[in-house]
Amino acid sequence: MRYLRIATLVIVVAATTKIWGQSSPASQWVFPGADGKLHYQALPNGDTIMDFSTAGYSGGGVSLPSISVMQTVSPSGADDSDAIQAAIDAISGLDPDPNGVRGAVLLTPGTFSVNRTLTITASGVVLRGSGSGADGSTLDMTGNPSPFLALSLRGSGSWQTVGVARSISDSYVPSGSLSFNVDDASIFSIGDPVLINRPVTSDWVSFMGMDTLVRNGQPQTWIRAGGQIRTDRVIAGIDGKRITLDAPLTDSFNSSLLNPPGGSIVKYTFPSRISHVGVEHLSVLAPAQDIDISLPQYQALTMTNVINGWIEDVAIQDTDNSVSIGSGTKQITLDAVSVAHSIPFTHSAGPADFSVSGTQILLNNCSSTGNTGVWAFVTQSEVTGPVVLLNCSADSRGFAPHQRWATGLLADNCRFPGGSPGIAYSDRGNLGSGHGWDAGWAVAWNVTSQTLLVQMPPGDANWTIGCVGTRISANEPNEPPKPVPNGIFDSLGTPVTPSSLYLAQMCDRLGPQAVANIGYAGACVTSDQH
């Protein structure tokens, strides 16, 4: 089951000739040029707003696949967990086709009682309902008084490096870069999956002002020196010692702060990461609870160690910490996923409806409603995007990265009309256990939000462009608190052209068919169609 979403956005970009907009002003940071391409203003070191359009299934601009049904399950009137899991396991045992696909389990219309976690651990397996509405398929968790997780899509293991790492030789690699020089590129080939390693050094932590966090008189650790922040990419080109990636880097690499040991690149394998798995066209129902997040909770879905996966047309009711896209995930699309709450959450530390780690993650037309006391959309620590929220909404809190330096984030045409924070790219200081700077190189583009707390990290940037809402300032929570400068605000109160940065960048990179593939036919318009 697939459906076409009619584009409601302003015309954004030409496929080949000219970028069109209505009467809205252009941003000074990303703007249409006379050559029919998007142009970017750079900061003094060459950093720019990155190209976010590689976020999503298969690297963006690719339709979600329609997988053939191999098993069908109908509701029994009793616990259906074993029957559904048996159907998933039967398909998991099939040989995959050349595309790595095995087949789908189809749930017929009706209510399926589930009392334990349903798991997909093999590539090419999809759980599909007959719709997310009242006449569709519902996974009902209410029969089990002990909270549990409804759905788990998970591979195992982690990245396994291959060969030796080669050093990045540039003194500075700007955020948003697709390429950089290394000391020796001879061991690499086009198509190699690679990790770009950015070391966490004491110099960098100090430069960020994160070595002085104190709470209740005790020092707090933001990110411990000695580790690495990894970016998962594929080599797209090699020219001498210069390597080009398939997607941009989300952070800068400043050798004066990162040496020794300096940035590096290494090949990897990930044999137990699964691919082409999804959950689609169903609803999940849980008992409504208002309990402390330290206690077990009903949760809807987690995804870990998955590449090229999706969650589509899923309606979730009354779960907490509902959807988690965890570590080892890459090129994932969440499309038309909604989380609704029937009661407020009253405890001091709230759960999150959508929690995102991984890289190249797209949340399209996702929503959180009735979420008083609940974080709607968050990222976790050391995330290297792009992570894109496109046309997402929440009626209370909005998009607030949670902790410890997520980079390459975009909220695009989102609506967060109530509550605070709405958009918060900020220094959270000693909150939590020293969450500190939660986001860098993050953009809010044409967002409507009650509040806009967007702050400027040392040596980095966060942007608010074309957004409607109240700009607020805040001190860093610390002992003592200290002032934090605001980030870059452009065209506050007046939306800009192009109306969607993500779609404009996709038009620029891939053309009109790509945006049609993800449900926005007509978003790219050439001059002869204008």
Image: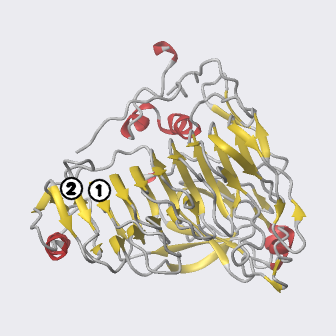
Asked which quadrant contains residue 195, the reply is: bottom right
Residue position marked by numbered label 2 in the rendering: 137
Of 119 and 429, the residue lying toward us:
429
Vertical position of residue 13 compared to residue 54: above or below: above
Q: Residue at x 74, y 51 (%)?
A: 453
- Determine whether, in the image, residue 254 is placed left or right of residue 294: right
Tell me which colouring the rendered structure shows. Answer: secondary structure
Mark 2 Cα-neighbour bin, 10 Å: few <14, some 14–19, many ≥20:
many
Residue at which label 1 appears: 283
The percent coordinates of residue 414 (x first, y second) are: 56, 42
Separation (CA) of disc 2 from disc 1: 6 Å
Secondary structure under the numbered disc 2 in the rendered image? strand
Q: Do the numbered discs 2 and 1 sit on residues whose CB atoms are within 8 Å?
A: yes
- Horizontal and vertical percent for residue 523? 47, 28
| Image position of 270 (left or right of 230) | left
Q: Which residue type does callout 1 highlight? A: Ser
Q: Is residue 91 among the parts visible in the rendering?
A: yes
- Name the disc covering residue 154, or none: none
**Along the line of sight, which residue is nearer the eye, 509 or 345?**
345
Label 1 crowd bin: few (<14), some (14–19), many (20+), radius 10 Å:
many
Q: Can residue 128 be seen in this view?
A: no
- Quadrant for the N terminus in the image: top left
The residue drawn where x is 46% and y is 28% is: 8
Q: What residue type is labelled 2?
A: Ser
Q: Is residue 201 above or below residue 68?
A: below
Element type at mark 1 = strand
* Image spot of residue 124 (x, y percent): 26, 64
